Image (cartoon, rainbow, N blue to C red):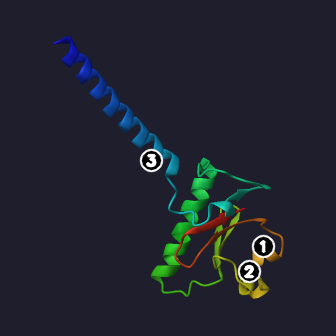
Amino acid sequence: MKKNNKKYFFIILIIFLVIILFVFSFFITYKNPFIKEKKYFQNGNFQKENNNYSLEEQKIISCSLELYNKNKINNINLSSQCLGNCYNHIVDISHNPRLEEDNLKENQCPDYLSGKLKHFIELDSEGRLIRII
């Protein structure tokens, strides 16, 4: 009977370890669906290596998605234009990867060009986050 108990113990231990490895690998490989290219997620002058947002960043992203959805519902053409402002950040639609037309002054927000606002958040034409600076 003791041999059977040891056998069951090792089987349960192996199953438990496999479950732990599965859960651990899920959290390691999880990617935030709002970030199309992680390398573009910036805050200040450094790049973040993970997708953990501060509360302020979460508010900015949420606000920018609301602006995007309002414009999309109103059938506004969502290609390379300024959508508005969210918490001192300009919300801009850009191509991913960027095209030359994204750098044209007529496709940039007046508040950014005038220097009134220095931070911006870029979304692609599908509403996915490209970068936040």
Residue at (57%, 67%) from the top-left corner? 36
Which amino acid is tagged 2?
A: Gln
Asked if the residue under mark 3 is in contact with the one under mark 2, i.e. CB atoms within 8 Å, the reply is no
| The image quarter in which residue 82 lies | bottom right
Circle 1 SS class: helix
Q: Give the mark count.
A: 3
Q: Could you say where residue 3 lies in the image, as x and y percent from the top left?
A: 22, 15
Which amino acid is tagged 3?
A: Phe
- Nearer to the camera, 45 or 28: 28
- Which label lies toward us, 1 or 3? 3
Circle 3 SS class: helix
Asked if the residue under mark 2 is in contact with the one under mark 1, i.e. CB atoms within 8 Å, the reply is yes
Asked if the residue under mark 3 is in contact with the one under mark 1, i.e. CB atoms within 8 Å, the reply is no
Residue at (52%, 57%) from the top-left corner? 32
- Nearer to the camera, 116 or 107: 107
Q: Could you say where residue 91 lies in the image, as x and y percent from the top left?
A: 65, 71
| The image quarter in which residue 18 lies | top left
Query: Dot 3 corresponds to which residue?
Result: 26
Which of the image's four quarters has the N terminus? top left
- At label 2, counting other C-alpha atoms closer than 10 Å, the crowd grade (few under 14, some 14-19, many 20 or more) is many
